[in-house]
Amino acid sequence: MGDGLRLALTTLTVARVRGPRSLDRHTAGAAMALAPVVGLGLGLVAAAVLSGFGRLTRAGTPPLLACALTVATLAVLTRGLHLDGLSDLADGLGSYLPAERARAVMKQPDVGALGLAAVVLVLLVQVGALLGAVQSGRGTVSTVLSVVLGRIAVTAACRSTPAAAPDGLGALVAGTVRRWVPIGWALVAAATGAAYGLTTGDSGTARLLDGARPVLAVALSLLAAWLLRRHAVRRLGGLTGDVLGALVETATTVSLVVMACDLPL
C-alpha cells in the first residue's frame, strides 16, 4: 500500500516523495487503484484555490479569474502530464496512420495542430464549465468530484485493457487493477456527491436535482472516458501513458460540464 501510494504520487503529481522500494506490476496496480485518493487530494487543493480567490473577487463580478487559476493550479500540480497526453493522443488519432506509426507520432516532442487545439478547447470548456458551476453555487463540490472522476477513469482503464507496446507506462499498468476497484470508487463518488447534493437544495425538488446531478456526472464522465479508451485502443492497439492522460482530462471536463448544467424538471 505504501509503495503504491508513493508511486501514485510521483506518477500523477509533482510531489517529491521517496519512490517505491520496488517497481513492478503489483506496485503499479496498487498505484492505479489509489489514483482516486490522489485525485481527492488534488481536488481539495484546487477547491481551496477556487474558494480563496473567489472571495477576493469584487462582489457582483463573475469569478472568471478564480476559475482560470483553479484549472491552472491543477495543470501545475500534475506537471501538465495529462494535458500532454491529451495533445499527443489527439495528434496520434488525427494522423489516421496504422497503430505503430500513430504511436510514433505521439512520441514526437513537438505538438501538432490537432494536439494544440484539443488542449486549448478542453481548457476553455473546463474554465467555462467551472464558472457556470460557481455561479450556480456548486463550484467546490464540482471541482473535487470532477478531479476525482478523472482519476477513477484511469483506475478503470487499468482493469482489463491490453497494453499497446511491451514497454512504457501502459505496459506497466495494463490489466493490474481488480474489477471491483473502479466500480467501488464510482459508487463511492456517486453516493458522496448525491448525499452532499441532497443537503444543499432549498426545496424538495431542488434537493432531488442536486442529488441526481453528481450521479449523472459520474455516469456520463466515466462513459465518455470508456468510449475514448475503446476508440484509442482500437486505433493504437492498446493502452499507453498518453491515453491515460487523455482519459483524465476527458472525464474531468465532462463532469464539470454536467455539474454546471441545470437539470430539466
Image: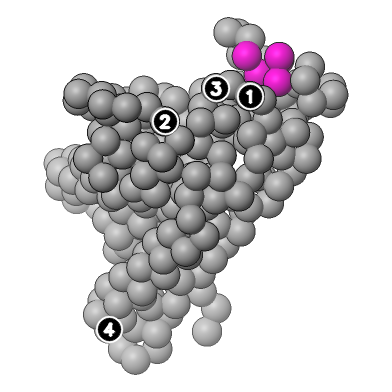
Label 2 or label 3, whichever comes before in sequence order: 2
At 15% from the left and 43% from the top, the residue drawn is 52
Q: Three-letter amino acid code at disc 1?
A: Pro
Q: Decide: marks 3, 1 in contact (CB < 8 A)?
A: no
Q: Secondary structure at mark 4?
A: loop
The 10 Å Cα crowd at callout 3, few under 14, some 14 to 19, many 20 or more, is few
Alpha-carbon span between mark 3 and mark 4: 50 Å
Query: Residue at label 2?
Result: 24
Alpha-carbon span between mark 2 and mark 4: 51 Å
Label 1 or label 4, whichever comes before in sequence order: 1
Q: Is residue 89 above or below residue 144?
A: above
Query: Residue at label 4?
Result: 202
Residue 51 placement, left or right of 43? left
Q: Three-letter amino acid code at disc 2?
A: Asp
At 44% from the left and 52% from the top, the residue drawn is 152
Residue 56 placement, left or right of 208? left
